[in-house]
Amino acid sequence: MTADASHKTRTLWLVGVLHAFTHAYHVALMPLYLLIQRDFGFKSVGQATALVTVMMAGNFIPAYWMGVLADRVSRKKLLGLGLFINALGYVALAFAPNFGWALVAVAVSGFGGSFYHPAATAMIARMFPVGTGKALGLTGIGASVGFFAGPVYAGWRAMQLAPALGDAAWRRPVMEFGVLGLIAAIVFMLLADEDKPAPAAERVIASRVKMFPTPALWMLFFVAAFAFSLRDFAGSSMGSLGSLFLQHAHNYDTRDAGLALSWIFLPSAVSNPLFGHLSDGGRKRWAAFVLLTAAVLVVIFPHVPSGWVIPVFLVYGFFFMSSYPIVEAELMQSVPDAVRGRVFGLFITVGGFIGNASHWIVGELVRGMGEGANHSRNYFWIYAVLGLMIVLSVFGLRCLGAVRTREQIAVKGDAS
């Protein structure tokens, strides 16, 4: 292996470690909703789920501006600083005395998380112009680990401490995740190789490059972002709604709910690099395949008996989570390198903000059920709508394909 190849491989795995923490923070609160509700004295579980909605809003709203920075400055510094802020917000949440301070803490944590995806995705796409899907799939293993470890550890740790700490037991795993993240951020900054920005002259040129040269391209992009926000809404709901569904309708405790949710994410450690690699030979057909398969599993989920919950979660996660590196690779290869950070930042700002409103919305839907939340049949229509959202998101693939085609035509027209 050449020195350059060794550098790329090392960087790939280090970025994957940061990916793990970024996504662990997204899901660690999900099995803790009912403990948080009781500890703060919330009237509605919707206030507890709103914490994740605010965190994710803080994550996605600044993403475009993080993309601007990612096109101009050291991506290593952005990644290290982002995780530090992300983790610091988690530590602050563990000590929040009331709902107001909890909202501030999760907003800060979400802001730190907004640094990761624009910088990391643009970095990997530039490092691996060939085999982009496979490379993004490999960094996706980090997300799989984080998604798995977040709910399973938080749920288990809270249940372990509940006899001594009562409803406040949720605070300890949150604090522990935060401290580990602070350590990881420092280690990353000390050990990771510097991702040098382009020379000053190139940065000036890049800053003048239009994200999309025609109104038609802008429209196609926004339609694609909205389409995939439906996918994100459904995927986020499978976590938050799944936690409440299992604890209400199947009488799971906090530990068991966290363990069950974690099985959504573990299979993607295999499926992300697998389908990411396969998609390098045909993105649209593989993305459509994994999304449509996931949609069917979402619809049938509330109909299965309790013993089948984890197997369905496993298969669903295997297919659904693998759509992310495929779509990200398609998006990155649809636009020139000079604007990839900005494009991806805007993409997740639009799609992510809409998609992650799901945490609060499903919490309010469950609250509105009252005693009916204890019966599986009352969830059938919600899961059917979520499945339909995933089906509709497939339309975004056609939009991204059109962006790539029209982008090439526009570039040729400018060159001539």
Image (tube, helix red, strand yellow):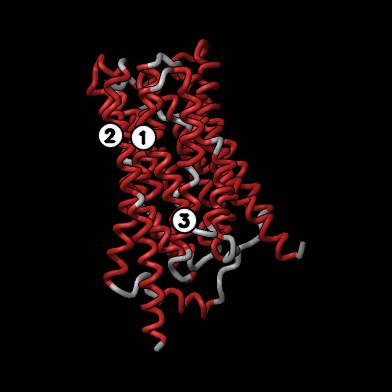
User: Residue drawn 55% across and 27% down?
Assistant: 153
Give the spatial CA distance, label 1 vs label 3.
21 Å
Looking at the image, which residue sits at the far top? 163
Q: Earlier in the sequence, mark 1 or mark 2?
A: 1
Residue 281 appearing in the image: yes
Q: Is residue 114 above or below residue 182?
A: below
In the figure, is residue 285 to the left or right of 351?
right
Q: Label 3 neighbourhood size at 10 Å, few (<14), some (14-19), many (20+)?
A: many
Give the spatial CA distance, label 2 vs label 3.
26 Å
Looking at the image, which residue sits at the far right? 1
Say which element carries label 1: helix
Q: Mark 1 points at which residue?
A: 237
228, 367: nearer the viewer: 228
Q: Mark 2 points at which residue?
A: 361
Q: Is residue 367 above or below residue 184?
A: above
338, 94: nearer the viewer: 338
Q: Do the residues labelled 1 and 2 touch (CB within 8 Å)?
A: yes
User: Residue drawn 54% across and 49% down?
Assistant: 275
The three-letter amino acid code for the residue at tag 3 is Glu
Q: Which mark is residue 328?
A: 3
Say which element carries label 2: helix
Q: Work out which quarter of the rendered image holds the N terminus and state it.
A: bottom right
The three-letter amino acid code for the residue at tag 2 is Ile
Q: Which of marks 1 and 3 is nearer the N terminus?
A: 1
Q: Nearer the viewer, mark 2 or mark 3?
A: 3
In the figure, is residue 169 to the left or right of 387?
right
Residue 78 appearing in the image: no
Q: Position of residue 42 (x, y in %)?
A: 30, 22
In the figure, is residue 416 to the left or right of 174?
left
Q: Earlier in the sequence, mark 2 or mark 3?
A: 3
Q: Label 2 neighbourhood size at 10 Å, few (<14), some (14-19), many (20+)?
A: some
